[in-house]
Amino acid sequence: MAKKSSAFPVGLYGALLVALCALTLPAVFQPVERALLGAVARVSRAAAGLAGEPVGAAPAAVGAERVARSSDVLRRVAAHHVGGAPAELALRHGPVRCRVFGVGGRGGGGGAPCELRLDRTYAELGDSLPFVTQGDCFVGYLAQPGGPGAADDVPGDLARVLLPNHPLAAPMHAEVEVGPDARLRVVVRPAAAADPAPVRVDLWDDPYAAARMERALLPVWTRAVVGSGSHVPGGLRLGTTRIWGYARTDDDEALTLGVFVVPEPSAPSLSHVVAWRRDVAGAPVEPPVAAAFATATVREMPGMAAGRFLLVADGEVADGAAVARDGALLGVVRPLAFGSGLVTGFAATRLPWVLLLAPDGVGVPPVELRAVVVRAVGERVWLRRLGDVMAAPLPAVGELFTGSNGAHCPAGLWIGRCEADSQDLNQLIVALPPLQGAATVRWCTGERRP
Amino acid sequence: MKRWLAWFLLAPQAYLLAGMWRECGLPAFDMGVLWCLFLAFFAERTALPWLLLGAALGRALVDDASLALQVLVLGVPVALLLPLRLVLHGQRWLHLAFAAAAVAFAVPRLADWFGAWFAQPSASAQADGLVVLWTAVLAPPLLAVARRVPPCRGFVEVA
């Protein structure tokens, strides 16, 4: 028997099986993992306490300057999102800025996410128009609790937005700007999940002109049609076209088989959207939500070169909470037992981030993007933009901030100064502030309205 | 009992020691590979699951992915190398160096695959040729030392 067990190590295979179960059902095993890692971290905490002198915080002026930058970018974002809306909409209705808490949904056109979750409940947005915008762009339809796409939701739930590629999204009247004075009227509807883009052009007022459309990236705008029953006003930008068909050759003309629309801005990169209250003409924008922070201490783990930190807090920290030091983002925390947490520095994370890029220059609107860290050398980090490869090029230089990355990672935390990578148009090089040793930090406990 | 206490107290911290070694300007090596080789070639077979847990705890301390994923990343090479113990028993320096190079190459790949599969990407998924080389060079002498001192000494399988 002993020989059999040594030839077939049941225990080892069992451990691998349990690990697979834990990965499939993370919520069940999470408390055990937190307790085990918390206990191990106690030893590291004691060891770290003996090693080296803590490095003090940056001068107060540095922190204040970074906080001012954060406030400035949030103000610029708000001005762009609300001020860019069509005048008719802004005159008749009051804007409600909502933070995007999550992007998801299955079966969306083009295989893309098709739903947003906002930071406000259906009840809070009860008297709003049934759509949301961002600047002059149409984002999606505000779902109704118990209605299509939100059958199980109740008014107290966080509101859901159905994007134009949601399978239940209504077809929409639109027009393609084929020339300076030429517009092709169309009806767009959600594409299939297997289609190459999220939204598909379904009907044309001039199919012959449509079949001869050779150029992609033409702007598509919503169109108001009297008697259509749609509440979406005309003049909102929906996205840009993509052509599916045969390119022109020496012998043959180009043949367009299908025209698709890629919505702008891209849903996964959204941080904020604007809902519109009915009959609140000229109402001022509500004050933005303020992120609430709690104080904690972080200590750089030995040998981890600014990639991993041990956080010690008074109570339990929230999973995925942003940790800021001197007004700059340090990283995100994973909670452990015994009032501690493991912070992964921004440079060491490999999960996608929603970010705000404020280009240098007066009056230039911030850019929302979704990107992932691909490389880090010292305090320099290479970020690759995710999403549509045909999107507009990234600004040359600017300041990088967090976008909306969940309930405990607010938008507007300063990350660093960045510049476009001259070797790769879809990459940014970010210079992070230097950091060593131990320091007092703040971690985000959530957000509250003033 | 004492040997288990020593294992769970010291084995996870070895990753931090390896980091300090690197910070001192010495050649970087992958501590996970060292634990994989110890578990596969020298440790008591009956103790393997718990020894693996201790090694995975240390990796979870320094890496972004979850503990379960670390168990898989370290456990799969151990499970694959374990049958070779019959052939490669004892301190065979060259064989250990080759095995270390193979595992040092495999561990980041596994972290990459499992990370992509379970949506837990981590920075350790990027293999570094220099780290592979130095792990292959340093693993045999470090294993020779580790087998003679706690916490490994208590778990060395007696033939």
Image: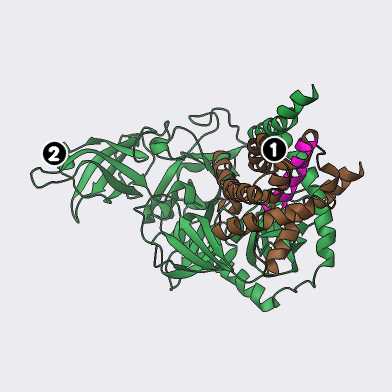
Chain colours: A green, B brown
Q: In the depicted view, which residue is nearer to us: A140 or A312? A: A312
- Residue at point 65%, 64% (across, down): B27
Residue corresponding to mark 1: B85
To which quarter of the image does residue A415 belong? bottom right
Circle 1 packing at 10 Å, graded few (<14), some (14-19), many (20+), is few
Say which mark, if any, is on residue A182: none
Whole-percent x, y for residue A346 in the image = 60, 59
Identify the residue at the far top of this view: A1
Q: What residue type is labelled 1?
A: Arg
Quarter of the rendering occupied by the N terminus of chain B: top right
Whole-percent x, y for residue B11 in the image = 79, 50
Whole-percent x, y for residue A258 in the image = 24, 37
- Report whether A364 appears left or right of A206: right
Q: In the depicted view, which residue is nearer to us: B65 or A91? A: B65
- The verdict on residue A82 being magenta is no
To which quarter of the image does residue A421 belong? bottom left
Identify the residue at the far right of this view: B2
Establish whether labels 1 and 2 are both on one chain: no
Q: Which amino acid does label 2 sit on?
A: Tyr
Name the secondary structure under disc 1. helix
Q: Which of marks 1 and 2 is in front?
A: 1
**A144, above or below A125, in the image:** above
**A342, above or below A228, in the image:** below
The CA distance from mark 1 to mark 2 is 73 Å
Q: Can residue A280 be seen in this view?
A: no
- Report whether A389 appears left or right of B30: left
What number of labels is visible?
2
Q: Which chain carries label 1?
A: B
Name the secondary structure under disc 2. helix
Quarter of the rendering occupied by the C terminus of chain B: top right
Residue corresponding to mark 2: A208
Q: Give the range drawn in magenta.
A: B47-63
